[in-house]
Image: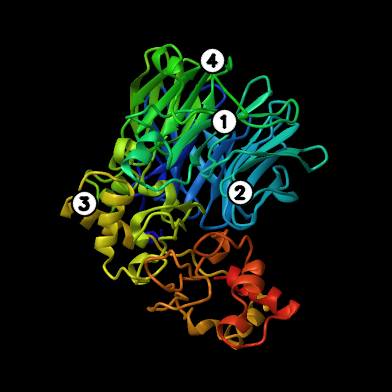
Amino acid sequence: MFIPATVLFVRSLGRSSPTEELDRSPYDLAVSRDGRFAVTANGTSDTVSLVDLVTGKVSAETRVGKRPFAIAFTPDGRRALVTNWLSDSVTVLAVTPDSLIATATMPVGDEPRGISVSPNGANAYVALAGENSVLEIDLRSLKAKRKFEAGIEPWHVAITANGGKLVVGNARSQDVSVIDLSSGSVKDTVRLRGHNVRHIAIAPDGDWAYVPNIAERGRPATRENIDLGWVIGNRLNRVPLKEEGPREAIAMDPRGKAVADVDGIAVSPDGQTIAVTAAGTHELLLFRQPLPFVSFGGPDDHIDKELLADTKRFRRVALGGRPLGVTFLPSGKEIAVANYLSNAIQIIDVVGARVTKTIPLGGPAEPSLSRKGEAIFNDGNRCFNQWYSCNTCHVEGHTNGSNFDTFNDGSYGTPKKTLSLRGVTRTGPWTWHGWQTDLRKLVHDSMAKTMQGPEPADAELDAVLAYLKTIDFRPLKPRTETAKRGETAFKAKACDSCHQPPDYTKNGVFTVGLESPEDVYKGFNPPSLRGVGSRSPFLHNGSAYSLAELLTKFHRPSQLSNKPDCTAQELADLVAFLKSL
């Protein structure tokens, strides 16, 4: 989000910050080692706030890059580092009890998300979601040291207490990478059997890494299947770090009152309590060991009955808003949560399972129409028995890369990959088959049929449509010489006959040789190619796992435009061009 310099001012406290009318929307927070202060990554104001947790007040706030996403303290508490997702950078901040000063910003690579600092404070590790890798930064020189391969779209990273292993959660390859930092090699890749892999917390003894995600069961989105947990379920996984082995998991959904959009996770200092934020159902889940983790053949579709009945081992704390990042305070008796939609930090008493303090970060007195729409978009209560939200599949208005069997294509039994919603208000017609020409009707049907939720009111549809207008493509990347040659090849192969700039789509439906006799609607509307590099797997059924496979197997020029197929050089150039869009 671009914020003109005219909205900035200097307060009497000596801090430079946006006006109070801006939503802060904290994605993440970090707490100092003594538990006195927290810093927050404020996603929609492009700022970081320093919060005194004792007085319950914001001590300082400063501008960083665009869309700050994750934040971490150095062990001495003198510096904090924040990833700027839309600026492809990391900002380093000097921290004192009453000041927060950005001292350096360094480019790190494509789409930085999670960040973690080594226990000795020497290095930081940044998940580069757009490059499927993790960057190691020397914190003395602020220079890149090494880059490690990861899975597809890494979101968060965590380091063991001894600094020996780095754990990486890969959102769209549905796995966790365990990297040996001494050798720089991937020691193990552990499958999680589901997308939306989120925050990671490591047990104090270093034996396990805990991570929440969703499990897609592949059944049609009927009320019965949703209730049975056969469409989407929510899982708490633990990944072995002491030795190689499969992930173990428990289901977190009570039947009739599921949880939705599990995201943040933290483990208490004694390793006995695990806290998980459920952003879609606006709550904090508290689990107490021992937990009935299973590996092969499980878990079941709903939470273990004995666990559900034991209030000492499973509790739900209503928070409201959209709780995301979470951490224990040093005592282990309190938890701090970054609440995105509430523009606040919340402090929760673990024993009492209740909110004891809410610290506002600043924001408008009343939400805008688009902000109301964003709240609806992220609300799991809009789904039958609150299993998932719009954001579950259209993550941040994009796609989580999974196939779902909804009725938006006119039938069940014909699952389709989730389309990105970036630029959606100007890239109709809609659905893979392009049969829907009314976006308002499409939003209505998604809420009432795909989610099997309550009938949306007109005012609610107005709000969601206003929010969709704010979801845009990422800025175009600078064109390398390879990408420039790829643009020439793109035109020479007549790719632009269906994918026309500026959004690289076209208002029409075309047969491309991938049609199925089971489809109610024939042919496909060309999806926009803006941001296509971050949408793997590709095609309506996710059958192409790379752009190279797409162009050589499914979308060969000789099949679609009667042009010669790509040479090896043309293929490399064309892929580079597509990744620049």
Classify mark 2: helix, strand or loop. Answer: loop
Classify mark 4: helix, strand or loop. Answer: loop
Q: Is residue 491 above or below residue 26?
A: below
Residue beneath label 1, please?
Answer: 237
Residue beneath label 4, please?
Answer: 289
Q: Is residue 277 above or below residue 195?
A: above
Question: Which amino acid does the dot numbered 4 rest on?
Answer: Gln
Residue beneath label 3, please?
Answer: 460
What's the residue at 38%, 54% (across, down)? 412
- 23 sits left or right of 476 in the view: left
Question: Which amino acid does the dot numbered 1 rest on?
Answer: Asn
Query: How many other residues sit within 10 Å of disc 1, few (<14), some (14-19) or many (≥20)?
Result: many
Marks 3/4 in contact by CB < 8 Å: the verdict is no
Instruction: Answer with mark 2 or mark 1, whichever residue precedes in sequence.
Output: 2
Query: How many other residues sit within 10 Å of disc 3, few (<14), some (14-19) or many (≥20)?
Result: some
Marks 2/1 in contact by CB < 8 Å: the verdict is no
Task: Give the image location of residue 105, x and y in percent.
Answer: 59, 52
Residue 201, quarter of the rendered image = top right
Q: How many marks?
A: 4
